[in-house]
Amino acid sequence: MADNRAIGVIDSGVGGLTVVKELKEQLAGESIIYFGDNANVPYGNKREEEIAQLTKNMIDFLIDKDVKVIAVACNTISSLLDKYFTDYDIPIVSIIKPAADYVVENGIKEVGVIATKFTVQSGAYDRFIREGDESIRVISEGSPNLAQIIDSGNFTEVRGVIDLHMTNILSKGDLKHIILGCTHYPIVLDKFKERSPSINFINPAYEQVRYINQLLEARNMKAQLDKSTFQIYTTGKEETYHKMLNLLSIDLPDNIIELSCQTI
Ligand code: DGL
């Protein structure tokens, strides 16, 4: 049996488009409804309760739109899933757990994680990776501003900020693998590679979508559509999405709908 309902995707802003890119590559027949809360970006500097409330608003919005699964295309939110979001009937899929499994399954013994301050302080990557193999060394670096700089669409400062974080993390270990633990960061993957060409930068979006594919297959929930649809809802501005979609070579959606700012 097919399930033609859309896949819901949530993020604090445009970072989740890196997950949309993977959905369009790995699950091309599926419809997508995206929610980007750009008015409240960055989540990574907020209090836990505030992030949980903003996230609940997004999840409830997408459940009202009758999505079949929600991809949490945000590491910061994913670090809170176990604590706040276990009571829903529909699957809510973390981006952290599949990336942690990738590290364990590929026998990586030492891995870096660059993420928001909140994600790093939550210790979620360390926890999920060590649950798989407690001998793996995880070296983390938190950024207070990189996600917001990328979300603003003004990339002039990006190189300098990446250089600072790469210098910091490489001073803590001779790393070969680094997880880009914030979905905004793969938007500027070329700049990370330019700074450190020999490092394997891991994009968790790939592993998350691979996991969603397996989940839909196991539950007989894949769509069979002549034409899939793609809609974006944002508390920010439509132009920001045009710019980012273009940068990521993602086709324009059927529509982009600006919502008034979420209230907490
Ligand atoms: N893109 C998000 C993440 O993966 C959140 C960035 C932010 O809002 O601070 O963590």
Image (cartoon, rainbow, N blue to C red):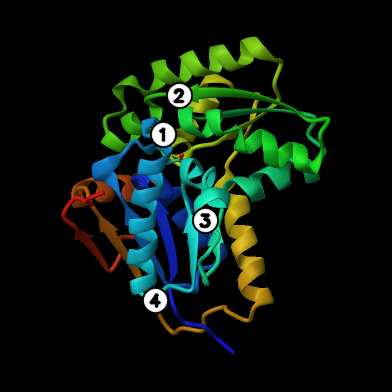
Disc 1 versus disc 3: nearer the observer: 1
Label 3 Cα crowd, 10 Å radius (few <14 / some 14-19 / many 20+): some
Residue 27: quadrant of the picture? bottom right
Whether residue 208 sits left or right of residue 136 in the image: it is left
Q: Which residue is mark 4?
A: 66
* Circle 2: residue type: Ser
* Circle 3: residue type: Glu
Label 1 Cα crowd, 10 Å radius (few <14 / some 14-19 / many 20+): many
Q: Earlier in the sequence, mark 2 or mark 4?
A: 4
Q: Which residue is mark 3?
A: 22
Residue 17 placed where, x, y %?
41, 51
Rendered residue at 38%/56% (across/down): 56
Q: Earlier in the sequence, mark 1 or mark 2?
A: 1
Residue 250 placed where, x, y %?
39, 55
Task: Kindly report the distance in space between the C-alpha atoms of the residues bearing marks 3 and 2.
Answer: 24 Å
Mark 1 CB near ligand 1 (8 Å cut): yes
Report helix, strand or loop for mark 2. strand
Disc 3 versus disc 4: nearer the observer: 4
Task: Kindly report the distance in space between the C-alpha atoms of the residues bearing marks 1 and 4.
Answer: 28 Å
